[in-house]
């Protein structure tokens, strides 16, 4: 059964020369017509999944242009071997319009945050009662749902009107059940990268102090947004 599935997949990807003789009953023409219908069904499912993944990008580009670009992405193999929830990975990189590209990146990050591991986020209330030494020694890491994006356009306001068009860096989090978008200073991107590994909070504050007027306040804003989990 597994060999038959692999043969069908190879045929859909590389053409009828990869279809073993006798795998299906019927004439060669009937078999190829059946495979063509199956391939079209898969392609259509991928296109619909892209529409569902990028509603703001689609609205910005218009249905016709989005369909053209998403079909080109699918035809070039960009959606192969991906689950539907992850089907749009890399789509933003194919978009020449900077607003469309940023919109797609935001929407992809939103979906990643939505499907991320359900882990409690560190909250400011968790810091209550800690003295300075305990606060600085508290170990944290980036929350599984947290994503930092550096933007080249005013796309953020098209996704969330509460965000100013001038947002240059965006934090995508899911501290509870709801995905949240927050404008953050560009320096926060470096701190999120540091927090990929378990880090004492004091190290993150010190790193931000070097590139931000008030590292402590900036870290507090990231915690309030749900950027970290306590380790």
Image (cartoon, rainbow, N blue to C red):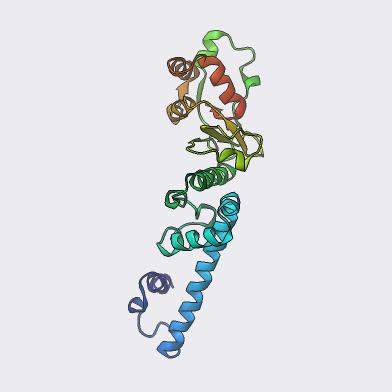
Residue 186 or residue 32, whichever sits in front: 186
Q: Which residue sits at x=49%, y=62%?
A: 68
Residue 5, image x, y percentages: 43, 71
Quadrant position of residue 182:
top right
Q: Quadrant of the N terminus?
A: bottom left
Q: How many numbered discs?
A: 0
* Extreme-left residue of the structure: 17
Q: Which residue sits at x=54%, y=20%?
A: 218
Residue 41, image x, y percentages: 53, 71
Q: Relative to 96, say whether 201 is above or below.
A: above
Residue 223, image x, y percentages: 58, 24
Q: Relative to 80, say whether 21 is above or below.
A: below
* Extreme-bottom residue of the structure: 27
Q: In the visual, does 134 lie left or right of 193? A: right
Q: Relative to 137, say whether 105 is above or below.
A: below
Residue 119 or residue 67, whichever sits in front: 67
Q: Relative to 181, say whether 6 is above or below.
A: below
Q: Which residue sits at x=51%, y=52%?
A: 86
């Amino acid at each position: 059964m597994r060999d038959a599935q692999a043969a069908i997949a190879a045929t859909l990807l590389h053409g009828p020369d990869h279809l073993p003789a006798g795998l299906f009953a019927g004439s060669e023409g009937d078999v190829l017509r059946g495979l063509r219908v199956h391939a079209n069904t898969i392609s259509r499912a991928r296109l619909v999944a892209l529409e569902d993944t990028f509603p703001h990008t689609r609205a910005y580009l218009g249905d016709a242009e989005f369909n053209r670009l998403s079909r080109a992405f699918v035809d070039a193999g960009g959606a192969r071997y991906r689950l539907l929830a992850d089907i749009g990975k890399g789509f933003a990189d194919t978009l020449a319009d900077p607003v469309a590209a940023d919109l797609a990146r935001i929407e992809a990050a939103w979906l990643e945050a939505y499907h991320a591991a359900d882990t409690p986020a560190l909250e400011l209330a968790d810091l209550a009662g800690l003295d300075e030494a305990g606060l600085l020694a508290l170990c944290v890491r980036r929350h599984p749902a947290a994503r930092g994006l550096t933007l080249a356009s005013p796309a953020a306001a098209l996704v969330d009107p509460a965000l100013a068009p001038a947002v240059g860096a965006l934090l995508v989090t899911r501290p509870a059940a709801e995905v949240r978008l927050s404008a953050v200073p560009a320096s926060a991107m470096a701190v999120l990268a540091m927090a990929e590994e378990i880090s004492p909070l004091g190290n993150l504050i010190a790193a931000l102090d070097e590139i931000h007027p008030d590292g402590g306040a900036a870290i507090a804003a990231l915690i309030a947004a749900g950027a970290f989990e306590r380790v």
